[in-house]
Image (spheres, rainbow, N blue to C red):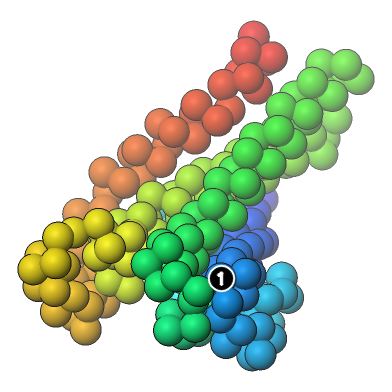
Amino acid sequence: MDDKIEAIVLSFPVLLLAFCVHEFMHAWVALKQGDDTAYMLGRVTLDPRAHIDPIGSILFPLVGALTGAPIIGWARPTPTNPRKYRNYKRGDILVSMAGVVGNLGLAVMFSLLHLGTVLLARSLGPMPWMGTAAQLFGIGVELNVMLIFFNLLPVPPLDGSHVLYHLLPGNLAHAYRQLFPYGMFILYALLLVGALWPLWKLTQDVAELFLTFSYLAMG
């Protein structure tokens, strides 16, 4: 199989898992903060059918993969009602950060699986499936690190915008809030002009750190 096609094939199940965990974490933490909106809509689940958006989860990442651009996408946004949070500010920050915490957990998990595959290869000798498994786990680290940095961007409606809003002083927070209806236009503009390419380089550097122990084991 062509290397590029193989990478795309391996990327999609990892990406779908990353999206599902990200949205599940939003929904679960919202429920813990007192908001049952997502729970009542069946979103406190890892079932892909509850979270996947055909355009954001499949088409957009596929276009990125085929054109060589960073593989970025999104799932169906988790519906929340911040007025139900026991503490609005605390709840909104925790729910916003929950998704990236889920992706961080997946990045750690995939790095450990990658290390396990390397150690198994050293112990038993290389087997044909091990190369594919190591590549899959490496992609898992990269994509989840990418989603962490992407979602932390302070551009509405990404998670980082909610956190920044609560950290700004009153007047600045109000002015920043006026940008929220135009967030997607800003995001698309950043993508079109290539302003997010440095994010991909940062992702690769950080993913290398996650895989440090694997590289040491190889050496």
Q: Which residue is mark 1?
A: 33
Residue nearer the viewer, 163 or 64:
163
Q: Residue at x 91, y 20 (%)?
A: 124
Q: Residue at x 8, y 68 (%)?
A: 171
Element on which disc 1 rests: loop
Q: Is residue 58 left or right of residue 213?
A: left
Q: Mark 1 belongs to which amino acid?
A: Gln
Q: Is residue 132 above or below residue 217?
A: below
Residue drawn at (57%, 87%), measured in percent from left and top? 37
Picture layout, residue 49 above or below residue 99: below
Q: As drawn, is 79 to the left or to the right of 202?
A: right
Q: Give x and y (percent) for residue 155.
A: 25, 65
| Residue in the foreground of this view, choosing between 48 and 215 | 48
Which quadrant of the view contains residue 214? top right
Does residue 126 lie above or below 81 as drawn? above
User: In the image, residue 164 lies at what x, y percent?
Assistant: 26, 59
- Residue drawn at x 67%, y 41% is 110
Percent across and percent down for residue 183 are: 23, 75
Q: Nearer the viewer, residue 97 or 189?
A: 97
Q: Residues within 10 Å of mark 1 (few under 14, many from 20)?
A: many
Location of the C terminus by quadrant is: top right
